[in-house]
Image (cartoon, rainbow, N blue to C red):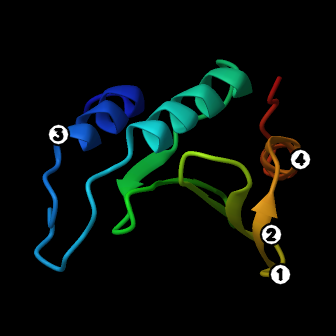
C-alpha cells in the first residue's frame, strides 16, 4: 500500500462522481490541509487510513487498541472529529482544532509534536 501522503495526493486524480453517487472532486485545499496536519504531528505518529469523502474532503482514521479517531478535513478549519476512547465513550465535534486532534492522539498513546 502506498504511503498515506501518496494516497492523499492520488485523491486529486479522482473524477467528479468517482463512486457513481454524484460525489464532488476531491479538493486540493483539503488534500493540502491533510498533508499539513500530518507534517505538523511529527514522525512518531502512526500513519492514518485515508479515504476520500463525497463532499470533496478527506478523512483520516487512526485505530489503536480500543481507541478510534476519525478526522474529516475539508480544506479549512475547523476539523470534524469523532473519537472513541478505551471505555467506549464517544466524542463528536464539528469544530475541532489542531490542538484538539493532538490531545486525542496523545490520549491514544501517541506523542504528537
Q: CA distance from mark 4 to mark 1?
A: 15 Å
| Front position among marks 4 and 1 | 4
Residue placed under numbered mark 3 in the picture = 13
Q: CA distance from mark 3 to mark 1?
A: 37 Å
Residue placed under numbered mark 1 in the picture = 89
Secondary structure of residue under mark 3: helix
**As displayed, is residue 43 above or below residue 78?**
above
Residue placed under numbered mark 4 in the picture = 103
First in sequence: mark 3 vs mark 2 = 3
Please tell me how crowded label 3 is: few (under 14), some (14-19), or many (20+) other residues with Cα within 10 Å.
few
Of residues 52 and 30, the one drawn nearer to the viewer in this rendering: 30
Q: Position of residue 38 (x, y in %)?
A: 60, 30
Of residues 108 and 60, the one drawn nearer to the viewer in this rendering: 60
Contact (Cβ within 8 Å) of mark 2 with mark 1: yes
Q: CA distance from mark 3 to mark 4?
A: 33 Å
| Front position among marks 3 and 2 | 3
Q: CA distance from mark 3 to mark 2?
A: 35 Å
First in sequence: mark 4 vs mark 1 = 1
* Residue drawn where x is 36% and y is 37% of the image: 8
> In the visual, does 75 lie left or right of 17?
right
* Residue drawn where x is 19% and y is 76% of the image: 22
Contact (Cβ within 8 Å) of mark 4 with mark 1: no
* Labelled disc at residue 85: 2
Amino acid at each position: 500500500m502506498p504511503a498515506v501522503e501518496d494516497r492523499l495526493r492520488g485523491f486529486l486524480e479522482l473524477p467528479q462522481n468517482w463512486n457513481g453517487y454524484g460525489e464532488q472532486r476531491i479538493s486540493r485545499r483539503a488534500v493540502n490541509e491533510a498533508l499539513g496536519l500530518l507534517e505538523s504531528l511529527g514522525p512518531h505518529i502512526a500513519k492514518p487510513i485515508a479515504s476520500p469523502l463525497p463532499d470533496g474532503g478527506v478523512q483520516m482514521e487512526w485505530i489503536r487498541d480500543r481507541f478510534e479517531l476519525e478526522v474529516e478535513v475539508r480544506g479549512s478549519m475547523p476539523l470534524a472529529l469523532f473519537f472513541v476512547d478505551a471505555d467506549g465513550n464517544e466524542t463528536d465535534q464539528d469544530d475541532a482544532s489542531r490542538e484538539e486532534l493532538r490531545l486525542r492522539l496523545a490520549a491514544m498513546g501517541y506523542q504528537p509534536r
